[in-house]
Image (cartoon, rainbow, N blue to C red):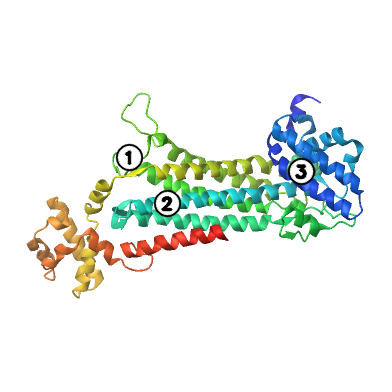
Amino acid sequence: MNETRAGYTVSIQYDRRLYRQDIAGSIAHARMLARQGIIADDEADAIVGGLRAIQVEIEEGTFRWRPELEDIHMNIERRLFEKIGDTAGRLHTARSRNDQIAVDMRLYTKDLVTEVVEAIGSLQTTLITIAESNFDVVMPGYTHLQRAQPVLFAHHVLAYFEMFDRDCERFRQACKRADVLPLGSGALAGVPYPIDRRYVAEQLGFAEVSANSMDAVADRDFLLDFESAAAICMMHLSRMSEELVLWSSEEFGFIRLSDDYTTGSSIMPQKRNPDFAELARGKTGRIFGHLVALLTTLKGLPLTYNRDMQEDKEGFFDVGDTLLATLRVFADMLLTMRVDAGRTREAAQGGHVLATDIADYLVAKGMPFREAHGVVARLSADAAGQGKRFDELSLETYRGHSDLFGDDVYSITVESSLAARDVPGGTAPGQVRQALSAAKLRLEARRGG
Ligand code: ARG
């Protein structure tokens, strides 16, 4: 066979990372075959012993991977023959590579979810830490990237806590759908042996056994579930990246990322490029791409297994690796960044961020909100024309726009604005304190349960 043709079908260079799952699945299968009297006990013992020894070889790096054997299943099976002889041939009784690869990918997905949920939890812990240590920091909140209303920095940070909480939920759902044993489906129609699927499910820690053998070998929805959850989670990380890039610019100057997470330019010595945030934003595109690739791979496939499905792996592994790396980088990058509370306050006081509060002031004095909105819009234009902030305008100027204005208009400050938003979910300091405690409890509950 010429080289190009031989290499085309090979997957061992990437599916070898499934060795633990593949061996675990085979051991459970062999034990079940012996329990059911389908193979002899001493045959199962030899198979299990051989598989365990192979795992040690792989982990010690002495296993010789052979591309000509194509995939992880054939590599391990051939080695088992070398180690225990013809008894190895009994392992594949009542099994096919179609239900074997499905069980490997499901086991892998379940482990991956555990790691991802843990990494998200660490990132959320970091968010709580920086929200607490910067609790007094005020900044402008934005809509349309225009300064809108003052908010606590902690409130802004906790918005991300919520996003990651929903991400965890999605990953756990993906895990639930992966938690179904496909083994026992054979090639597609089931197997003509008295197997015990429940026993295998228990051995491997699956909650259920699949209800339809054809679906079980054709289904990769659980990978799509994971990749969709990952795409959404990366989108959140990418939005945060965008803010870090903006905030660390000279224009904003809200934060300073630690030297470990910025790089200089080779020709412009003043630069501190936020490469990690930029790369996270960039890698998000790749993750979205993998999701679309897998959807596209699956969309035209007739039941049941088709070799096209081998193409699920590289993208899936990359999604898991990239997501985990990004979550871990972010936890440390955020923990080591410094917030410039002076700059954020300056921004929160400028830009007529208190306009809504002045309108609310007029409402409190009896003016309908729509009318108050118009008055403050004109006042705002007036202030802009004079190059002044609201608190620098004279009372005459105020009263020129409405005689409802009195001296007490000067008591409208960033602090009064924050304090006024004292509703559940609002940015009043008392509410944000409560939100912080609630966030901690939720995180603990998730780790406990
Ligand atoms: N390497 C294959 C895959 O990942 C394993 C299953 C092969 N099954 C088959 N009938 N050729 O999809």
Q: Which residue is mark 3?
A: 23
The amino acid sitting under disc 2 is Leu
* Towards the viewer: 386 or 312: 312
Numbered label attached to residue 249: 1
Looking at the image, the residue that sits furthest to the left is 396
Residue at x-position 80% and y-position 47%: 27
Residue at x-position 40% and y-position 37%: 274
Which circle's residue, 3 or 2, is located before the other in the chain? 3
Q: The C terminus is located in which quarter?
A: bottom right
User: Nearer the observer, disc 3 or disc 1?
Assistant: 3
**Vertical side of 205 occupied by 20: above or below:** above
Q: Quadrant location of ligand 1?
A: top right
Q: Which residue is mark 2?
A: 127
Characterize the local packing of mark 1: few (<14), some (14-19) or many (20 or more) Cα atoms within 10 angstroms: some
Horizontal side of residue 413 vs 220, given as left or right: left
Q: CA distance from mark 3 to mark 2?
A: 39 Å
Residue at x-position 57% and y-position 49%: 116
* Towards the viewer: 205 or 89: 205
The amino acid sitting under disc 3 is Ile
Characterize the local packing of mark 2: few (<14), some (14-19) or many (20 or more) Cα atoms within 10 angstroms: many
Circle 1 — which element?
loop
